[in-house]
Image (cartoon, coloured by chain):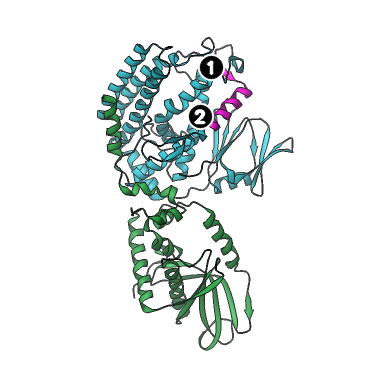
Amino acid sequence: MRKLLNTLYVTSPNTYLSLDGENIVILKDQVEISRIPLHNLEGIVAFGYTGASPALMGACAKRNIALSFMKPSGKFLARVVGEVRGNVTLRKAQYRLSDNTEESNIISRNFILGKIYNTRWVIERATRDYAMRLDVDKLKKVSKVLANSLKLVEQSENLEQLRGYEGEAASQYFSVFDDLILQQKEFFYFRYRNKRPPLDNVNAMLSFVYTLLAHDFAAALETVGLDPYVGFLHRDRPGRISLALDMMEELRSVYADRFVISLINKKEVNSDGFTQKENGAVTMDDDTRKTILKAWQSKKQETITHPFLQEKVEWGLVPYAQAMLLARFIRGDLDGYPTFMWK
Amino acid sequence: MMEYKEEDFILLSGIQHFSFCRRQWALIHIEQQWQENLRTIEGQILHERTHDNTVREKRGDLIVSRGMAIFSRSLGITGACDVVELHKASDGVSIFGRDGNYKPVPIEYKRGKPKEDESDILQLCAQAMCLEEMLLCEIPEAFLFYGETKRRLKVTLEDELRQRVQTIVKEIHELYDKRYTPKVKPSKRCKACSLAEICMPKLCKNPSAVNYIKKNLLEVEE
């Protein structure tokens, strides 16, 4: 597999990112505070209203380094995209499939099969790891419903039906999500999923981590020559990376959600890092965001065995591997899209 | 003689990729994928020097031309020669703006050492065939220079070799017209291939994604 390079997260606001030779140089008040060689990077994510030089943008585009700008909240602002190059034939095949709702349904079914398979695994795994602390019967019941959802999804005839099954499975999963949180329960609880704005600490963390994952998928899709904006399950909407969102489905629970839960359960975050506004909207402070990013980086380095390729890969490369596999399916090398089914 | 249109020209450098591995060629030339590794970077550095076409060298009866752009309408290929030496010779051809007649000799620079396969030789021969067509001359021999051994290797451009160039170029055109990335048998070569990670040679063994999903779902039911 490809070497896992690093993503540079620039979290201090009011910095300026510039290019010097083969390095990215971070300036604050025109004073150099950091310098990192570009060849070690595969992505740069800048939070806050950071500026960047056109020369740096060009260098990133040329080297396939994903450069994204986020609001301090982690909300996506913009991404620097270089010249559209690469595989026209592949992209046209993608567009044709996306226009065909029947084909789109067949591909999307696999995204959702992966998603439900993995959420079910997250629940099953919890019943094994924390049998003494959990209402195992309750969780097993949900797991059974999810197993049934898998059968329904396999047979879904169109995208609408598929979305229906997905919605039911998601609400089953989220109905026990709070059970998986085993520490600091007075501050970290989950009632339901909300995002605009997040109304509790857990939702704030989930939203933030989903943004990171979407960025990784968009970058991976771009690298293999697919258009991250043209999806199958998520239909086109200007400015939305629909395909990245499609592909993310299968990793949400097993990668992002479990990551968030483990930060809480291991007490790597605490309630001091969150503030609630008068209207209930929750924001995270800089330190908490830094803690999350640091943990995210080391999570990415953890090695697993890819269930389809049967090769050792880092978690951080899974989006890349899946993007590659999707491209190979669209190209006709594979008889289906091998969704990521975690064990 | 059959002639290709300029827009249908394929890159001469692809001959080397194609004879190494058809899939590697398709990934680079159809899918426009590229991945650098140590070998490709070393090759680049070597070529930066040889391709510096601002340098003009004249040593007595010898003119050294670097980075000369070449093409052949009959083969439908285009590319560049690392170095073309023009040797003054009475039985050579006239060159515009130069006194006397010259015999062109292409020299291709390679980073490593002579390869077991004939990809370098085919590429060199194709270059010579382009020059022959452009200069209306005959080129009986050419050279490969290897960075590791620092030696020139003489290649005699026999009819049979030219025939092989024609065959491979024809195959490349056919595959390019299909815009299809072929599968090939994974082999030892995959280890030396900078595109192995993009290619995923395992995918050439026809693993079934449908069976993989089915198998996983069956386990859920049990």
Tell me which amino acid carries mark 1: Asn
In this image, A32 relative to B134: left or right?
A: right
| Rendering colour (chain B) | green
- When asked about the image quadrant of residue A44, the answer is top right
Residue A278 in the image: above or below residue A220:
above
Q: Secondary structure at mark 1?
A: helix
Residue A265 x, y percent position in the rendering: 51, 18
Q: Secondary structure at mark 2?
A: helix
Give whichever of A163, A270 is nearer the camera. Answer: A270
Q: Which residue ends up furthest to the top in the rendered image?
A: A186
Magenta span of residues: A277-298
Classify 10 Å Cα crowding around label 2: few (below 14), some (14-19), many (20 and above): some
Residue marked by disc 1: A201
Residue B152 x, y percent position in the rendering: 53, 74
Give whichever of B180, A91 is nearer the camera. Answer: B180
Residue B84 in the image: above or below residue A219:
below
Residue A271 in the image: above or below residue B106:
above
